[in-house]
């Protein structure tokens, strides 16, 4: 059956590959849309920031200089640069309710997420969830077929996009944790974008205080 690109709606040319069996092409984005996604290579080992050639970036060094934050988040893995095309993809996904894009995004993350004891999506406040209709981070786990552990709740605050970089990095704790004993657990946080790392670290510090052995994170994009 003919298939359409999940982003632009254009036809996906059927391609077949030879192997032990005849395998159908499983692409969900056309070549043009796929080409608009800039994959991160040789980014910062701490947060995947581009252009670092494997060296720690200034953001990660700043976090590590603060005793209360040093080592809270083991590392963040991001797949794509937050270029203009990715901004539009995530805007359609998050703010315009195009849930089907979760299927396209998770097709790239299957091999990027390591084994963990718990997969925890970054939650939305009840008000923000009502606005959007679904939690974009939880949808990624669902579509990837990974277990979803809703350990965190979030209070309603001003949108991160309306805050300055300094305001984001010095903001107050916005999460609450439902579990009190996570002793020895390896936990993976899931979110759509890493900008300053504040949101993920606020979640991680609660998990570490509850006994988690290691907390890392995955995001689709690195801003």
Image (spheres, helix red, strand yellow):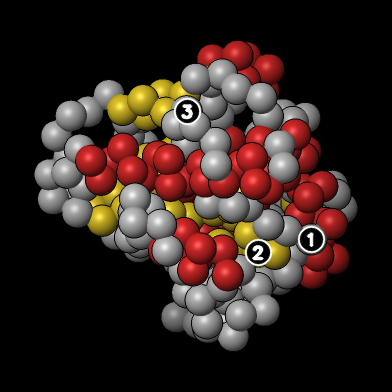
Give yes or no for contact between labels 1 and 3 (Cβ–Cβ under 8 Å): no
Q: Is residue 5 above or below residue 127?
A: below
Q: Residue at x 47, y 46 (%)?
A: 200
**Mark 3 lies on residue:** 174
The Cα atoms of the two marked residues, 3 and 2, are separated by: 26 Å
x and y percent of residue 195 in the render?
63, 52
Q: Is residue 37 above or below residue 102?
A: below
Label 3's element? loop
Q: Residue at x 60, y 22 (%)?
A: 157
N-terminal of the pair, mark 3 or mark 2, is 2
The C terminus: image quadrant: bottom right
Give yes or no for contact between labels 1 and 2 (Cβ–Cβ under 8 Å): yes
x and y percent of residue 105 in the render?
62, 52
The Cα atoms of the two marked residues, 1 and 2, are separated by: 8 Å
Q: Which label sits on residue 83?
A: 1
**Mark 2 lies on residue:** 80
Residue 112 visible in rendering: no
Q: Residue at x 25, y 45 (%)?
A: 208
Badge 1 crowding class, 10 Å Cα cut-off, few under 14, some 14 to 19, many 20 or more, is some
Label 2's element? strand
Q: Residue at x 77, y 40 (%)?
A: 91
């Amino acid at each position: 059956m003919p298939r359409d690109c999940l982003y632009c709606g254009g036809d996906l040319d059927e391609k077949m590959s030879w192997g032990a069996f005849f395998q159908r092409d499983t692409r969900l984005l056309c070549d043009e849309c796929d080409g608009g996604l800039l994959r991160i290579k040789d980014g910062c080992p701490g947060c995947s920031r581009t252009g670092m050639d494997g060296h720690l970036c200034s953001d990660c060094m700043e976090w590590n200089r603060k005793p209360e934050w040093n080592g809270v988040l083991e590392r963040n893995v991001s797949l794509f640069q937050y270029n203009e095309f990715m901004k539009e993809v995530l805007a359609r996904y998050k703010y315009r309710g195009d849930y089907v894009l979760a299927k396209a995004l998770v097709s790239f993350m299957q091999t990027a997420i390591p084994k963990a004891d718990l997969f925890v999506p970054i939650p939305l406040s009840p008000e923000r969830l009502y606005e959007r209709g679904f939690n974009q981070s939880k949808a990624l786990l669902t579509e990837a077929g990974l277990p979803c552990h809703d350990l965190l709740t979030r209070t309603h605050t001003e949108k991160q996009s309306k805050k300055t970089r300094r305001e984001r990095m010095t903001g107050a704790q916005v999460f609450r944790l439902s579990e009190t004993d996570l002793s020895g657990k390896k936990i993976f946080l899931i979110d759509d974008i890493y900008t300053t790392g504040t949101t993920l670290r606020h979640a991680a510090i609660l998990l570490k205080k509850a006994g988690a052995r290691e907390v890392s994170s995955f995001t689709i994009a690195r801003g």
